[in-house]
Image (cartoon, grey):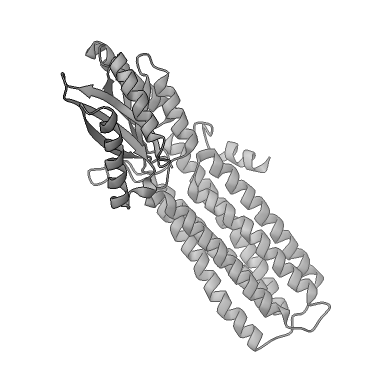
Amino acid sequence: MISKFLVKTFIKNSENTKDPKVRNKYGTLGGVVGIIINFILFLIKFFVGMLVGSIAISADAFNNLSDAGSSIITILGFKMASKPADAEHPFGHGRIEYLSALLVAFLVMLVGVQFIKSSIERILNPTAVTFEVVPFILLLVSIGFKFWLSSFNKFIGNKINSSALKAAATDALGDVFTSSTVVISFLIAKFTTFPIDGYIGVFVALAILYAGFGLVKETLNPLLGEAPDPELVNEICEKVLSYPLISGVHDLIVHNYGPGRIIASLHAEIPSDKDIMEIHNVIDMAEREVSKDLNIHLVIHMDPICVITDEIKETWNYVETVLRKYPEIKSMHDFRIVGEGNVKNLIFDIVVSPSISGHKKEKEKMLENIKEAIHSEHPQYNCVITVDYDFME
């Protein structure tokens, strides 16, 4: 309820999340709320940590302070990512959002390293922790704040599909766990003189490092070129195939230049005996309408396919039988027979897993075996095989 109220109050046209200005406001709102909440939590925990002499609570306090700094980075990241395209960056600056999330992740890990050192010092030089009711209640309140902040960041992160805000939500949820552990150590200190505070401090610091590592991995993936969302892939293929005269699609490649900045290209199979202008109009329409519907930039290449004849049908069936012997081959397309008489070119593409791209000798041996198998049955054909990789894996 509170999350929806904040969105409705501070973001005009909040449902129009495809608008870059609206998206930027979501990021700013998430950052401002994060700064306020985390700074309040820092003050609470720092006061409690100093009052009772707990290194674990103090570590958790400065973790919240770093989270406030991370929220500032999130705001700046959204501002810079929303900059329009220019001559040096023709596809915009959307990936800056990923870089800002990566910087936040490294800051989280830095805090973890610092407090491992502080906690080890506390283990070597233990100091008594004094349990008091009021600080204990304040720590419980801080956990409630963090849990709400996690749900808020997740809500707006899902709303605009932001990796930075989703990372902030994960980080806040991790803080709920670490803060709960600190509260437990604080409570145990009431019943024992064992210096558990330093050990809990190490545990909290390791949890912070683990969360930071997870965030680094999550934000690096889109920068390195991760496989696209399978749902988006299916939507693109289904929508393109819904247009008349398009009988198949292949070679779909999706490039992610940041949220809302996706460029895709694919090959559409069309009958070779149709008027080229009629086909071109269909392809143009598909590019425009699918791009608008999915908020992407789609480019379609036309692949004419031969009209099915008895020769093509018979040869296709035989080649398919040969290819089934190779599990790494996923599909075949662009099948055609070119030439006349006793010597013809049999041309087709096969789609294989990208995992075998580095095994050059194995790939060449596979192609050689396929050609030999086809030539033994159809000696009149000279096989021309192109290998495509399934980038959707």
Which quadrant is home to the N terminus? Answer: top right
The residue drawn where x is 31% and y is 37% is 370
Residue 334 position within the rendered picture, expressed as x and y whole percent measured from the top left: 29, 27
Q: Is residue 278 above or below residue 130?
A: above
Report if residue 235 is visible in the image: yes
Which quadrant is home to the C terminus? Answer: top left
**Furthest-front residue in this view:** 376
Q: Is residue 308 above or below residue 117?
A: above
The residue drawn where x is 40% and y is 42% is 328
Given residues 313 and 72, the one toward you in this image is: 313
Relative to residue 191, is residue 379 drawn left or right? Answer: left
Report if residue 95 is visible in the image: no
Given residues 70 and 36, the one toward you in this image is: 70
Relative to residue 216, is residue 191 drawn left or right? Answer: right
Q: Is residue 74 above or below residue 231?
A: below
**Furthest-bottom residue in this view:** 125
Residue 52 position within the rendered picture, expressed as x and y whole percent measured from the top left: 73, 78
Please identify the quarter of the rendering in which residue 115 is found. Answer: bottom right
Residue 80 position within the rendered picture, expressed as x and y whole percent measured from the top left: 37, 49
Please identify the quarter of the rendering in which residue 244 is found. Answer: top left
Count of numbered labels shown in the rendering: 0
Given residues 131 and 326, the one toward you in this image is: 326
**Furthest-right residue in this view:** 191
Residue 6 position within the rendered picture, expressed as x and y whole percent measured from the top left: 61, 42
